[in-house]
Amino acid sequence: MSNNHNAKPHDWRAALLAALREVPVLQRAADAAGVDRTWVWKLREADPEFAKAYDEAMEAGIDRAEQEAFRRAVEGTKKGIWHQGVLVGSETVYSDAMLALLLKGRRKKVYADRTELTGADGSNLPPSQIVIATGVPNADDFGDLA
């Protein structure tokens, strides 16, 4: 890997964007373009046009990864069957876990994990009994414990 810090941003930009479209991982793309990833972040902050191109390349790479995940889940992959060190056949292996993950991501209303809050008898809780806790409590929240 060559980190040419004297290079102008446009010298490595096209290579970085092409690499992101192939594999949407910044460190890998920066290595392929021969640039330190901190230069990428600096250019993103300074150049809205590059930031847009970066986001588009990253999305294209993620789309490509999603297509491959779908292919493995639905079309499957060939796996060799070996017996005593000899390839005797093959089978198509599908990924149920990958398919479930894709469906959860794309059809949240149907497949997302949910938690239902119910009373002891299974009935709906009245809104006054539902408390959603987030973050760290304030010191004032415990005033009645003193």
Image (spheres, rainbow, N blue to C red):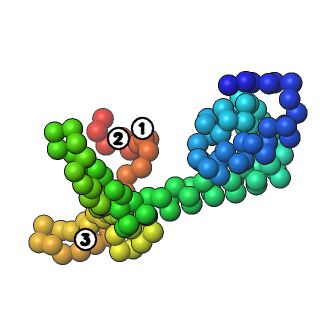
- Residue 136 at x, y percent in the picture: 42, 41
Count neighbours of disc 1 (C-alpha within 10 A) and say few if under 14, some if 14 to 19, many if 20 or more.
Answer: few
Q: Residue at x 15, y 72 (%)?
A: 122
Residue at the (22%, 51%) spot, across then down: 88
- Residue 66: x, y in percent? 50, 60
Question: Which of 118 and 111 lies nearest the eye of the viewer?
Answer: 111
* Residue 126 vertical position relative to residue 31 in the rendered view, above or below: below
Q: Residues within 10 Å of mark 3 (few under 14, many from 20)?
A: few
Assign a secondary structure to mark 2: helix
- Residue at the disc numbered 1: 139
Q: Which residue is mark 3?
A: 125
Callout 1 secondary element? helix
In the rendered structure, which disc, 3 or 2, sits on the residue that comes first in sequence?
A: 3
Q: Residue at x 81, y 24 (%)?
A: 5
- Disc 3 vs disc 1: which is toward the camera? 3
User: Which residue is disc 2 drawn over?
Assistant: 142
Q: To which quarter of the image does residue 131 belong? A: bottom left
Residue type of the residue flagged with mark 3:
Leu
